[in-house]
Amino acid sequence: METLIAILIGILFATGIYSMLRRSMVRLIIGIILISQGANLLVFTSANIWEGKPAIISPDEKVLTAPYADPLPQALVLTAIVIGFGFIAFALSLIYRVYQDIKSDDLNDLQNSDRDPEHG
């Protein structure tokens, strides 16, 4: 199972980097999303979280007994997901505004828009 998850993490990183190398701003955001999800899965996997290992103490126990999962990576991944949603919403709104001004999502057109008096 760990090998399958490691392959999935590699695929997420590879497709994310490939998408970020395209000239489209939308594909850039898709690449960032894929890399962030790969990083979340990597942190989640490194915490050794599997079925049957709770991260909480049951009401009848005073101390957490083995086997158990570390709750810190779960909290970090949850926080990263929330921050990622905020970043994606902000980036999509910026891309929409740029598209309204330039009428293109090509990064080269964005570079040339500073010198064009029509957009200025």
Image (tube, rainbow, N blue to C red):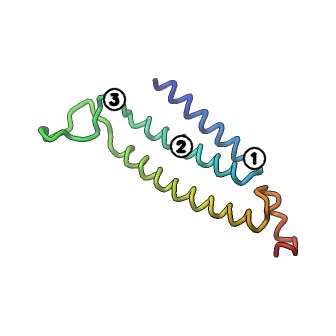
Which residue position is annotated with label 2?
Answer: 37
Residue 69 at x, y = what percent?
Answer: 31, 36
Which residue position is annotated with label 3?
Answer: 51
Picture quarter with the C terminus? bottom right
Q: Nearer the viewer, residue 106 or 36?
A: 106
For the residues labelled 2 and 3, the Cα–Cα distance comes to 21 Å
For the residues labelled 3 and 1, the Cα–Cα distance comes to 39 Å
Residue 22 badge: 1
Count of labels in the image: 3
Image check: 52 left or right of 99? left
Image check: 60 left or right of 35? left
Q: Quadrant of residue 16?
A: top right
| Looking at the image, residue 24 lies above or below residue 109 | above
Label 1: how many Cα within 10 Å (few below 14, some 14–19, many 20+) = some
Amino acid type at circle 1 is: Arg
Residue 68 badge: none
Earlier residue among tags 3 and 1:
1
Q: Quadrant of residue 74?
A: top left
Q: Could you tell me which secondary element the residue under label 3 belongs to?
A: loop
Amino acid type at circle 2 is: Gln
Q: Could you tell me which secondary element the residue under label 1 belongs to?
A: loop
| Looking at the image, residue 116 lies above or below residue 8 | below
Earlier residue among tags 2 and 3:
2
Label 3: how many Cα within 10 Å (few below 14, some 14–19, many 20+) = few
Amino acid type at circle 3 is: Glu
Residue 15 at x, y = what percent?
Answer: 66, 38
Q: Could you tell me which secondary element the residue under label 2 belongs to?
A: helix
Task: Kindly identify the residue that appears in the image at 49 percent across and 43 percent down.
Answer: 40
Task: Kindly identify the residue that appears in the image at 56 percent across and 28 percent down.
Answer: 7
For the residues labelled 1 and 2, the Cα–Cα distance comes to 19 Å
Q: Nearer the viewer, residue 112 or 66?
A: 112
